[in-house]
Image: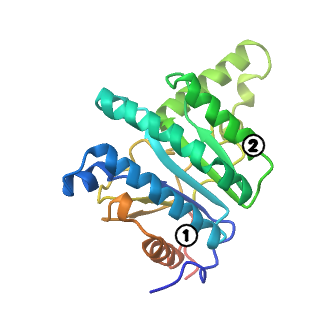
């Protein structure tokens, strides 16, 4: 089995759709929130593995704009889990040099969670060992719509002209402004869909759909997935040189 330290992955942006917490719990006759708690433990492991492999950017899909459709009890439990995770991990993330950024709309989040998010972003703002981005109340269509509205307001106020709006200008107003596009998107738990995750940013990303649920997606599977990715021929629309 390959270790997580012998794969050169500097300047790599890996994004993960962390799916399967509920199914993991159900298979073990546990409450769904137990699965989410186990999934939070896995986040710690994968962040550590990403740092060991010197991955530069890691983006995790924690809660989507569609996840509000879940039961009130599950949503409240998830929000409490997010608060606990930030409180428990803030000092470690800071000390290890992780820069944390949250993407997504904060309109529906409670103020206590927003304050914790903003505090962690401020605390880790000068770090550069790993750029950890967390999608919380994130949806790709929502992000694109918010960006279009922002640019329309800029035109209306006279800050820019309509002709100033191009691909770069649009990307510059996205939640991910300043981040490189993902090179690899991993989805766990055997589902073959992208679920509104980074649709603008992932147009040339490679995808891996892993059958294993997120709580069981360990460091060795992570390393194996990266090895598979390394063997792919990325052409970005050009003709293969192979």
Q: With 190 as the anchor, is 178 left or right in this view?
A: right
Q: How many marks?
A: 2
Identity of the residue drawn at 46% across and 35% down: 80
Q: With 53 as the anchor, is 190 left or right in this view?
A: left
Q: Nearer the viewer, residue 113 or 232?
A: 113
- Which element is circle 1 on? loop
In this view, the mark in front (2 or 1) = 2
Task: Measuring from the top left, give residue 139's x and y in whole percent.
Answer: 47, 36
- Which element is circle 2 on? helix
Task: Say above or below: 146 vs 210.
Answer: above
Identity of the residue drawn at 68% across and 41% down: 120
In which quarter of the view is residue 86 placed? top right
Task: Measuring from the top left, give residue 172's x and y in whole percent.
Answer: 71, 38
Marking on residue 123: 2
| Residue identified by numbered label 1 | 234
Q: With 200 as the anchor, is 211 left or right in this view?
A: left
- Comes first in the chain, label 2 or label 1: 2
Q: Is residue 223 visible?
A: yes
Cα distance between the residues tagged 2 and 1: 36 Å
Give the residue at the far bottom of this rendering: 1
Task: Measuring from the top left, give residue 149's x and y in whole percent.
Answer: 60, 21
Task: Measuring from the top left, give residue 190's x and y in whole percent.
Answer: 29, 60
Q: Nearer the viewer, residue 76 or 210?
A: 76
In the picture, the quarter occupied by the C terminus is bottom right
Task: Say above or below: 108 vs 61.
Answer: above
In which quarter of the view is residue 33 placed? top left
Q: Is residue 183 visible?
A: no
């Amino acid at each position: 089995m390959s270790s997580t330290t012998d794969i050169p992955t500097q300047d790599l942006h890996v994004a993960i759709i962390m799916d399967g917490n509920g199914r993991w719990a159900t298979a073990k006759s546990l409450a769904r929130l137990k699965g989410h708690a186990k999934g939070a433990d896995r986040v710690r492991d994968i962040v550590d593995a990403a740092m060991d492999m010197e991955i530069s950017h890691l983006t995790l899909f924690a809660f989507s704009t569609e996840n509000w459709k879940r039961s009130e009890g599950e949503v409240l439990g998830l929000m409490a889990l997010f608060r606990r995770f930030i409180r428990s991990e803030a000092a470690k993330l800071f000390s290890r040099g992780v820069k944390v950024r949250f993407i997504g709309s904060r309109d529906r989040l409670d103020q206590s969670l927003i304050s914790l998010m903003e505090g962690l972003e401020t605390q880790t703002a000068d770090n550069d060992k790993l750029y950890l981005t967390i999608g919380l109340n994130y949806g790709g269509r929502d992000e694109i719509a918010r960006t279009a509205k922002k640019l329309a307001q800029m035109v209306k106020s006279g800050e820019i002209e309509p002709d100033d709006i191009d691909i770069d200008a649009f990307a510059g107003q996205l939640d991910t402004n300043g981040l490189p596009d993902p090179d690899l998107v991993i989805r766990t738990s055997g589902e073959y869909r992208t679920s509104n995750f980074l649709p603008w940013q992932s147009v040339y990303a490679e995808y891996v759909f892993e059958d294993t649920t997120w709580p069981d997606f360990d460091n060795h599977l992570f390393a194996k997935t990266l090895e598979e990715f390394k063997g792919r021929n990325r052409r970005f629309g050009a003709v293969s040189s192979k």
